[in-house]
Image (tube, rainbow, N blue to C red):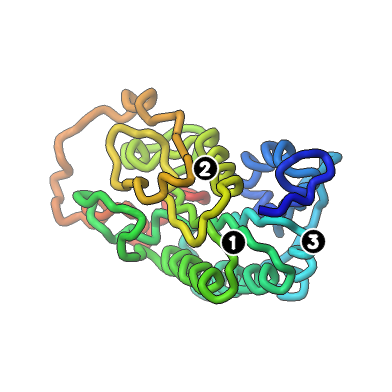
Amino acid sequence: MPQHSSSGKPFGRLLLTGAGGNLGRQLRGALADWADTVRVSDIAPLGEAAPHEELCPADLADREAVMKMVQDVDAIVHLGGISIDAPFDDLLEANIRGTYNLYEAARKHGVKRVVFASSNHVTGFHPVTSVLDTDAAPRPDSLYGVTKSFGESLSRYYYDRFGIETVCLRIGSSFDEPKNARMLVTFLSYRDFIELVRCSLFANRVAHAVVYGVSDNPASWWNNAKAAFLGYRPRDSSVPYAQRFPAAAPHADLADPAQRFQGGPFVLGEPMEKAAS
């Protein structure tokens, strides 16, 4: 990995896209320990810059703006884009054109490591009776999931063709606490999310990797054994919140797609939250 820092920190300059979103706000402060300079970007308000920060508002669909945004960075944490299902034209600009612009800028500027915020909705049409490893076939549950599957494929191409390493984080439900019974399975605490990003940035080699972003919950649909080389060890769990969603008899409607498939309400076109869920 680049060692451009003059202070002994692992990175000279990191870029964080989507810095104004839910997870971007959680991660933003942690990056100060990892880089001399953190360039933060979003189309949402970014607030005041900390002493170590550079504010760089940019629309991911604006290729020229993205090219300038990526200049002189050592690595990228790409959280930007739309994080719920939405009209295709909106998703096209933010999640497809925007992701292409970012990787093309990384190629032209010689950036060799990207951490890409993918989603569990890439595999949301797998049944809840399956436990998926990181080689599971994509089965997107929504157009949003399709755009994240595109991002994973695009990052695979940019690794195979140009050597840009990427860790694709198939983020579960990352909030301060689970919001419903489904999230007892998919919960990813903010602390574990930050640790997962740290592992993805600091691992010596990652090639093209996929990892499920999930805490150490007692029930799981995902197996990260094939991503163990990242060293990610979740510290949190949904167990403390289980009493809020007491066990109940199985849903009477066994044909209900939201109960049968891992994507939950996304399979019905009903996004659960305006965040990774």
Query: Where in the figure is residue 171, as x and y percent of width and height?
Result: 46, 49
- Residue named by callout 2: 196
Say if 218 sits above or below 92 in the image: above
Side of 193 relative to 106 (left or right) = left
Q: Which mark is residue 81?
A: 1
Say if 158 sits above or below 213 in the image: below
Q: Residues within 10 Å of mark 3 (few under 14, many from 20)?
A: some
Q: Amino acid at mark 2?
A: Leu
Q: Residues within 10 Å of mark 2 (few under 14, many from 20)?
A: many
- Residue named by callout 3: 72
Q: Is there CB contact under 8 Å for labels 1 and 2?
A: no
Q: Amino acid at mark 3?
A: Asp
* Alpha-carbon span between mark 3 and mark 2: 24 Å
Query: Where in the figure is residue 142, as x and y percent of width and height?
Result: 39, 65
Q: Residues within 10 Å of mark 1 (few under 14, many from 20)?
A: many
Q: Amino acid at mark 1?
A: Gly
Side of 260 relative to 85 (left or right) = left
In the image, which is nearer the foreground, mark 1 or mark 3?
3
Query: Mark 1 or mark 2: which comes first in sequence?
Result: 1
The residue depicted at 50 percent of the width and 36 percent of the height is 192
Query: Where in the figure is residue 167, as x and y percent of width and height?
Result: 51, 56
The residue depicted at 43 percent of the width and 51 percent of the height is 211
Query: For residue 7, which quarter of the picture?
Result: top right
